[in-house]
């Protein structure tokens, strides 16, 4: 009985592991991501009976909560700063730094809505599952978040922020 | 002041996707995933097998798992292999940590489906890489950009028959030092216009359309 539960969990975890790793890699440094991945899987295992048929949005919600817990601390801020400072950007198109900066200027909810929309590629209903919102609320707030991001992108940037490029 | 229109949702989406910090995150090593999952279940079963302890005990156990998981995944983050098809047995094999093994596209009787961006976008692995060596019929490619899936640090392509290489339905004619766009499925390189040299305008355009950045 317990074995079959373990087998089913194993299947679920393998199917969702890479999306979860990407979810965390997009939001925190590698070390915290590894910690939170362990936390998330542990919660998924312990609450396996609660996992819905479409598990990924639910798991993103678990990961989000675990990450929020992990982020309560001074160390996280230092790590994030370090990550942003030497993030490998070899495949990023020009201008993505500004875009990521603009994203950081949004409030947590709007930022998460946009990330789930663009990076995890979730529907409003799935975002609702991950964030504990109704699909309708997601749609409304997503529209607003997109508008805020556009405004930030369009706003004149501080000269020093423009790029990390040398020279010029 | 600019009166240029705001980017549409689609443009905004494309820009955000192009800035995805996990766009080139390599997959975790399959063995270490096994280890991690085993630890999660095993630790909890040990904990609940006797009977569920108080929350302090649980927190200690959770902390242990986190440390273990952190160690495992951390160790792996520089060392990856399995493409993003971990759950698809036989999709590819791992010869060594960080290496994805593919076999050459079969030279079928010259029949190809017309390659479309939709067809390409649905494939589990697509990447750009430089051929860093060809020895004993094994082409070694170092991925430089991942469009979808996970190629690991290195990709080898075996079984590229010299006669078939470059045939329209088969592999691109791999040459050392050249850059290629490569799609794979089921452990095989996909020919038929889905893989080819970066310098090929058709292949390049296909990838740009399939994976807008």
Image (cartoon, coloured by chain):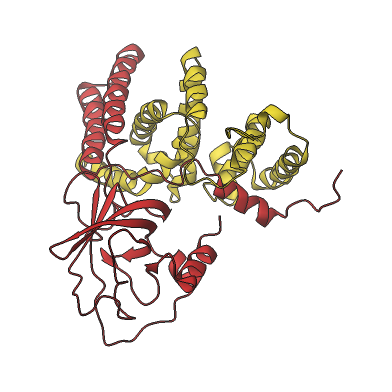
Chain colours: A yellow, B red
Q: For the point 20% across and 41% down, which residue is it?
A: B31
Residue nearest the viewer, comparing A166 with A27 = A166
Q: For the point 29% across and 53% down, which residue is it?
A: B87
B92 relative to B79, above or below: below
Q: For the point 82% across and 52% down, which residue is it?
A: B4
Q: How many marks?
A: 0
The answer to whether residue A20 is left or right of residue B81 is right
The answer to whether residue A162 is left or right of residue B157 is right
B97 relative to B14, above or below: above
* Outermost front residue: A167
> Residue B187 in the image: x percent, y percent?
25, 63
Q: Quadrant of the N terminus of chain A?
A: top left
> Residue A116 in the image: x percent, y percent?
56, 44
Residue nearest the viewer, comparing A91 with A150 = A91
Q: Quadrant of the C terminus of chain A?
A: top right
Picture quarter containing residue A159? top right
B127 relative to B27, above or below: below
The answer to whether residue B65 is left or right of residue B195 is left
> Residue A162 in the image: x percent, y percent?
67, 34
* Outermost left residue: B136
> Residue A63 in the image: x percent, y percent?
45, 33
Picture quarter containing residue A7? top left
The answer to whether residue B48 is left or right of residue A75 is left
């Amino acid at each position: 009985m317990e074995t079959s539960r373990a087998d089913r969990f194993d299947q679920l975890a393998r199917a969702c592991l890479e999306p979860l790793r990407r979810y965390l890699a997009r939001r925190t440094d590698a070390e915290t991501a590894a910690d939170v991945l362990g936390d998330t899987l542990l919660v998924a295992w312990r609450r396996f009976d609660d996992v819905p048929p479409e598990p990924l949005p639910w798991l993103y919600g678990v990961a989000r909560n675990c990450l929020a817990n992990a982020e309560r601390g001074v160390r996280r801020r230092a790590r994030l700063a370090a990550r942003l400072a030497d993030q490998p950007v070899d495949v990023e198109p020009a201008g993505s730094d500004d875009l990521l900066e603009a994203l950081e200027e949004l409030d947590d909810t709007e930022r998460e809505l946009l990330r789930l929309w663009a990076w995890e590629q979730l529907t409003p209903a799935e975002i609702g599952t991950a964030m504990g919102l109704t699909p309708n609320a997601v749609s409304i707030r997503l529209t607003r978040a997109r508008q805020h991001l556009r405004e930030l992108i369009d706003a004149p940037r501080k000269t020093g922020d423009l790029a990390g490029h040398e020279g010029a | 002041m600019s009166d240029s229109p705001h980017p549409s949702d689609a443009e905004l989406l494309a820009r955000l996707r192009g800035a995805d910090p996990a766009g080139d995150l390599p997959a975790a090593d399959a063995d270490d995933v096994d280890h991690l999952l085993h630890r999660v279940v095993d630790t909890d079963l040990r904990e609940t097998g006797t009977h569920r302890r108080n929350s302090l005990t649980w927190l200690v156990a959770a902390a242990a798992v986190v440390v273990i998981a952190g160690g495992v995944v951390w160790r792996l983050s520089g060392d990856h292999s399995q493409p993003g098809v971990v759950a698809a047995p036989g999709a590819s094999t791992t010869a060594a940590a960080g290496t994805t093994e593919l076999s050459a596209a079969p030279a079928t009787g010259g029949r190809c489906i017309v390659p479309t961006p939709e067809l390409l976008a649905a494939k589990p692995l697509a990447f750009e890489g430089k051929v860093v060596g060809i020895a004993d019929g094994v082409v070694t490619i170092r991925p430089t950009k991942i469009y979808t899936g996970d190629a690991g640090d290195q990709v080898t392509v075996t079984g590229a028959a010299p006669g078939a290489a470059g045939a329209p339905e088969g592999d691109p004619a791999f040459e050392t030092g050249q850059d290629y766009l490569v799609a794979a499925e089921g452990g095989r390189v996909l020919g038929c216009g889905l893989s080819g040299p970066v310098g090929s305008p058709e292949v390049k355009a296909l990838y740009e359309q399939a994976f807008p950045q």
